[in-house]
Image (cartoon, rainbow, N blue to C red):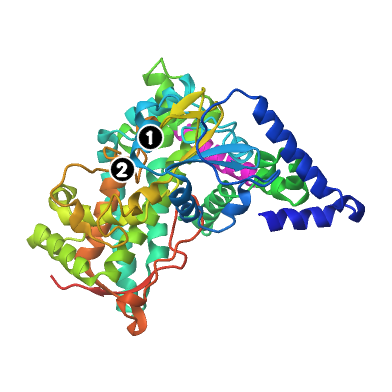
Amino acid sequence: MLHTCTMLFQFFLPSHLLLVLPFLFLLVHFLRRTQSRKSPTHLLPPSPRTLPVIGNLHQLSGSLPHRILQELSAKYGPVMLLHLGSVRTVIVSSPPAAEEVLKSRDVDFASRPHTTVTHRLFFGNQDLIFGKYGEQWRQLRRIATVHLLSHTRVLSFRPARQAEVALLVADIRSAAAASRPVNVSDVIIEFTSNFICRVALGRTYSEEKGKGSKVNKLFDEITALLVAFPLRDYIPWLGWLDRLNGFDYKVKKVALEFDTFIEQVIQEHIKMRNSNERTHNSEDLVDILLSLGDVDSSVSLSQENIKGLIFDMFGAGTDTTFATIEWVMTELIRHPNAMRRVQEEIRGVVGAEAKEEIIREEKLEEMKYLRAVIMEALRLHPIVPLLLPREASVDTQLQGYHIPKGTRVLVNAWALGRDPKLWDKADQFCPERFLNTSAFDFKGKDFRYLPFGAGRRGCPGIGMAEVTLELVLATLLLHFDWELPDGMRAEELDADEGHAIVIHRKSKLVLVAKPCRH
């Protein structure tokens, strides 16, 4: 980042002004130091030394910030203050500090910071994921938990789940029959996209040639923008560069495409409702959102709220499910003994029903080792390694440190799951650690393990994620034996991470599927 800023300055400023830049940096640094001496004394969290203007941004120049922050926290402590340009950011990487942020002081840290990208993409942050904490947000949360993602609603999506799993199995069988390796990453992202489209939007959109890929491409562009670095958010006086380098135009273009797509979906649903083409049993999430005012007079949703919630359901459900299945399959291939054990369990539980293409979901409850495998994969590879940023809405405390209002807080879930002081064999894949224990679940009961967050901002879609993950993985492991292509050995398969909010494999997972004879 420091090198990037230097290059920008060299390109845009006349050479005679470059001579005075070091003095300007020193002046800014001096004024900040002077101002801090005049301010009331508070015990702030420890912090690495900062550079003028950019603060600690230069220390986050790598592609995997959760790993960099873990290394910094090992030196400066589990509650660490960074200055990212003009933005104060506290990094949390211990269970007591995480519990204070996510539970005991949850209200103080329940809000989200304002960012220009989410504000422009999500209609002024009028959605559930990025919305500010307040009455409107509480209503959206209640709608999500009661009307969209309740246990009853998750059960109602069973036909769509099973239909898409059957198509997934058919695709893999086709590849196996043709002796082709299976690009597991591609078939899983197609499954998750089609399934979430069906339950959220009413149809897969793959029925129209090229439309499905267009939808995926649009959401890929949105997620790429969410990890971008708008200068105006961190160094406001350099915000004009966001216009000059085309970043503002790209955000505007993607926001317009997203709005146009969602508006078309909503209008399709309104037309079908007016023509009575929908029945109660065939309702999807858009139908439910459009009819909420009719069934609950206390609900008042704007068009922007509806559009924001549609993105939340689709964006969060697609990427997280895909990434988790990809990591579970990666770890099982790398650990043949665990693969053998989980397949024996699944085939033993299913028994004589193994010839059926789809597993009855009631059987999933008996697959304890499969659940342990998923939990262990999420410990090593939490889908969101840095929980989405929170913001202190008031002056507050954290582990005895003063946290000023407006400070951002990031909980490093990846560091918690890899801490050797908290976990035996922390960097090894050991599903057995999650057997015969009720201490851990996906809901943040133990603050060493936070794959879906916790507290008010915890993921409301855990129930949907659990049954979908278990059904897909159990089906893949029941019907197929899996190997690496071209004689690769298990230890040669990498587990390198890509850079995004949701962490995927850096390279796609390609395996050979051999149909199992039952």
Q: Main secondary structure of the magenta part?
A: helix
Q: In which quadrant will I find the N terminus?
A: bottom right
For the magenta stretch, what is the residue range? 254-272
Q: Is residue 291 above or below residue 286?
A: above
Lower sequence index among marks 2 and 1: 1
Which residue sits at x=76%, y=43%?
A: 26
Amino acid type for the residue under numbered disc 1: Arg
Q: Point out residue 16 in the picture as x, y percentages from the top left corner.
A: 92, 53
Q: Point out residue 57 in the picture as x, y percentages from the top left corner.
A: 62, 49
Amino acid type for the residue under numbered disc 2: Met
Which residue sits at x=57%, y=25%?
A: 41
Label 2 neighbour load within 10 Å: few <14, some 14-19, many 20+: some
Which residue sits at x=39%, y=66%?
A: 495
Q: Point out residue 166 in the picture as x, y percentages from the top left corner.
A: 28, 59
- Give the Cα distance between marks 2 and 1: 23 Å
Q: Quadrant of residue 323?
A: bottom left
Q: Which residue is mark 1?
A: 278
Q: In which quadrant will I find the C terminus?
A: bottom left
Q: Nearer the viewer, residue 345 or 262?
A: 345
Q: Point out residue 337 in the picture as x, y percentages from the top left corner.
A: 19, 70
Q: Is residue 35 above or below residue 496?
A: above
Is any part of residue 200 visible from this angle? yes
Q: Quadrant of residue 289?
A: top left
Assign a secondary structure to mark 2: helix
Label 1 neighbour load within 10 Å: few <14, some 14-19, many 20+: some
237 lies left or right of 374: right
- Numbered label attached to residue 464: 2
